């Protein structure tokens, strides 16, 4: 049961990178459930197909797939062309494709640092460029970047991902300003710990996860559905005057002072 009207995104087409799994699959599900037609993009064709079938069956919406590695601009160009060919345009670009792993900076190889910057930051830039024309033609184009909260503090073992997401935040603001004259908005969602994702299972397993919850004022991890609700709002006409903003959704974790945690 959604708090939004069922057809709040009717008539829109959303291209979602990283849409085959995790938070972005949840956003794609919510978009399809609210009337948007959706194109899922990622490297893994099998996972994409399975996700598309699942979301179409569950929502009754139209869901297509396009295989692309966001590190390759030409593959994104082809994905955008395929989406336009079948859906007739693109109104919403969700940049969610990301890579991450825990690594101490002193042991992180140049290739490891580059891989995450290439996927998260350069991949976001490539996708924005690839979708620029259809987003302009839309007249109400939206770029929704999936950021993070680890770059707002010095987060150990995350030098690569934090640097990449800081770049994504910066890109969000710049494009919001540069591309506003094309009727386009650019916003970001910065999720904190979201419990029901592969990322959390890998990056904060078992005891680490339990200790992490103690630092969240709302006392629990978030859910993919909660992030998806925010993504629906931001894509809707209710958010038509919002651009350049980065929405932290983390149960208060990133603003909690140590004294608050000791109460
Ligand atoms: N720890 C340290 N370095 C790692 C690493 C790890 N767990 N995983 C990858 N790297 C390094 C590799 O050593 C390589 O660097 P090198 O060339 O200097 O040796 C570089 O990253 C690229 O590795 P590769 O295996 O070619 O990865 P890829 O380019 O196919 O994919 C990732 C990179 C980040 C996507 C990959 O690590 C991955 O699949 N991660 C899990 C999925 C994921 O991150 N999902 C998102 C959840 S938030």
Image: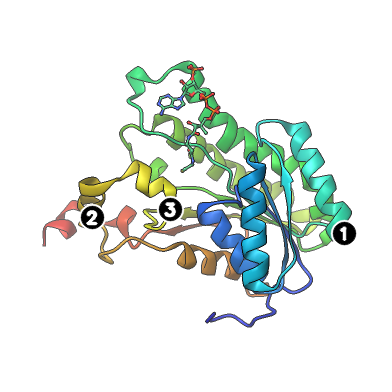
N-term mark: 2 or 3: 3
Q: Is residue 194 above or below residue 17?
A: below
Of helix, strand and loop, which one carries label 3?
loop
Mark-to-mark CA distance, 1 and 3: 32 Å
Q: Which residue is mark 1?
A: 88
Query: Residue 226 at x, y = what percent?
Result: 46, 67
Looking at the image, residue 249 sits to the left or right of residue 111; the answer is left
| Residue assigned mark 2 | 215
129 on left or right of 232? right
Q: Is residue 261 above or below residue 73?
A: below
In this rendering, which labeled residue sits more in front, label 2 or label 3?
3
Marks 1 and 3 in Cβ contact (< 8 Å): no
Residue 70, percent from left and from top: 66, 37
Residue at the spot 79% in from the left edge and 71% down from the top edge: 11
Q: Does any atom of ligand 1 lie closer than 8 Å to the CB of label 2?
A: no
Mark 1 vs mark 3: give the one in front.
Answer: 3
Identify the residue position indicated by label 3 in the image.
197
| Foreground: disc 2 or disc 1 | 1
* Residue 34 appears in the rendering: yes
Instruction: Determine the secondary structure under disc 2.
Output: loop
Q: Is residue 160 above or below residue 187?
A: above
């Amino acid at each position: 049961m959604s708090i939004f009207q069922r057809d709040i995104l009717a008539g829109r087409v959303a291209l979602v990178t990283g849409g085959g799994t995790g938070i972005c699959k949840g956003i794609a599900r919510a978009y399809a459930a609210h009337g948007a037609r959706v194109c899922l993009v990622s490297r893994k064709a099998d996972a994409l197909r399975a996700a598309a079938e699942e979301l179409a069956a569950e929502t009754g919406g139209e869901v297509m797939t396009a295989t692309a590695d966001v590190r390759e601009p030409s593959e994104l160009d082809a994905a955008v062309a395929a989406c336009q060919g079948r859906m007739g345009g693109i109104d919403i670009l969700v940049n969610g494709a990301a890579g991450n792993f825990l690594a101490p900076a002193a042991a992180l190889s140049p290739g490891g640092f580059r891989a995450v910057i290439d996927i998260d930051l350069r991949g976001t830039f490539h996708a924005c460029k690839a979708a620029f024309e259809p987003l302009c033609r839309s007249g109400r184009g939206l770029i929704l970047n999936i950021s993070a909260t680890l770059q707002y503090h010095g987060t150990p073992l995350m030098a690569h991902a934090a640097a990449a997401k800081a770049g994504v935040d910066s890109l969000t603001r710049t494009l919001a300003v540069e591309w506003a004259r094309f009727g386009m908005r650019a916003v970001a969602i910065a999720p904190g710990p979201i419990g029901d994702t592969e990322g959390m299972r890998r990056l904060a397993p078992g005891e680490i996860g339990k200790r992490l919850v103690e630092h969240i004022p709302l006392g629990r991890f978030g859910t993919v559905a909660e992030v998806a609700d925010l993504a629906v709002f931001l894509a809707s006409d209710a958010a038509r005057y919002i651009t350049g903003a980065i929405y932290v959704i983390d149960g208060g974790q990133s603003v909690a002072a140590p004294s608050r945690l000791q109460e």
